[in-house]
Amino acid sequence: MKQLSTGFFVDKTLVLTLPRRRDRLDAFYKAMPKDRGTLFSDIEVVFGCDGKRLTGAPNFTRETAGCWGCRQSHMRILEMTASHAWERVLVFEDDAEVSMIQNQLETITDFLLKVPDDWDVVQIGYYSGKPRTSIDPSDQSVSAVCTAQRAVNMHALIYNGKSAAKIYDLVWAFDAERIEAGLPIRHIDQTLNRLAGAGLIRRYVPPRKLIHVNKRLGSDIKPYRKDPENQL
């Protein structure tokens, strides 16, 4: 991933939050280090879909309100990215432990420089319970570029603007197939896993997450409604 003509790696940085969670947004900005190198410059706030302000997720999804809100929020980001023709969009959820950027800056930068040009999504912050595979076996460094079967958590990632419309359509198509088959739809991160596993999108990750979730803030997203088929 080459740097843009501006010298930064992305041309838009967004933080997803909810109007009623000003505490989380305040904590996010307080933790953001001043030295961000060439990762990004300014940050724009995007208010996501608040599942708890709705009547809940549609019955056919079997998702909790928080899970549905997360999905809809990322779909909104993809809509915005495609509509504004942004080249690369760095997305933080408001519980991203951005204070880590200070100590991880060199590693994140080295990692991004190694990402191949065919990328659609890069997940800097993620959890994977399964082995990651380096695309260059000779590179076993902390900034190696890997693929992962399972990469959950959406709190720190980069969308390729050229791929935004494609990802948007693929998510809706995948969900529509499941609904037609009488199956519940999945978390947005699980859907990306399926798309990446099928080779429909190119997703890259570092060997370990470089930005964690700020667990002190707690999560508004509860597990699925009881449904064994819907577990990953």
Image (tube, grey):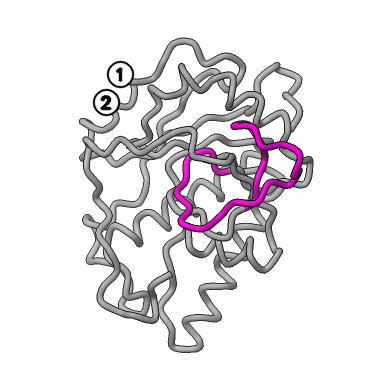
Left or right: residue 182 compared with residue 228: right
Q: Nearer the viewer, residue 102 or 130?
A: 130
Three-letter code, disc 1: Lys
Residue 98 horizontal side relative to residue 203, left or right: left
Taken as a whole, is the magenta stretch helix, strand or loop?
A: loop
Q: In this figure, which residue is indicated by the disc labeled 2? A: 27
Is-magenta flag for residue 135?
Answer: yes
The stretch drawn in magenta includes residue 209: no
Q: Specify start and end residues of the magenta stretch as a single range.
A: 123-147
- Location of residue 73 with respect to 34 vertically, above or below: below
Q: Is residue 72 above or below residue 26?
A: below
The amino acid type found where label 2 is placed reads Ala
| Mark 1, residue position | 30
Say above or below: 146 vs 140: below
Residue 117 pos. (x, y %): 79, 41
Looking at the rendered structure, the secondary structure element under dot 2 is: helix
Compared to 111, does 208 lie above or below?
Answer: below
Badge 2, how many Cα within 10 Å: few under 14, some, many 20+? some
Q: Residue at x 65, y 31 (%)?
A: 111
Q: Is residue 96 left or right of residue 11?
A: left
Q: Using the image as rendered, state which of residue 55 and residue 179 is in the foreground.
A: 179
Percent position of residue 213, x then y: 35, 39
Contact between labelled residues 1 and 2, with CB atoms less than 8 Å apart: yes
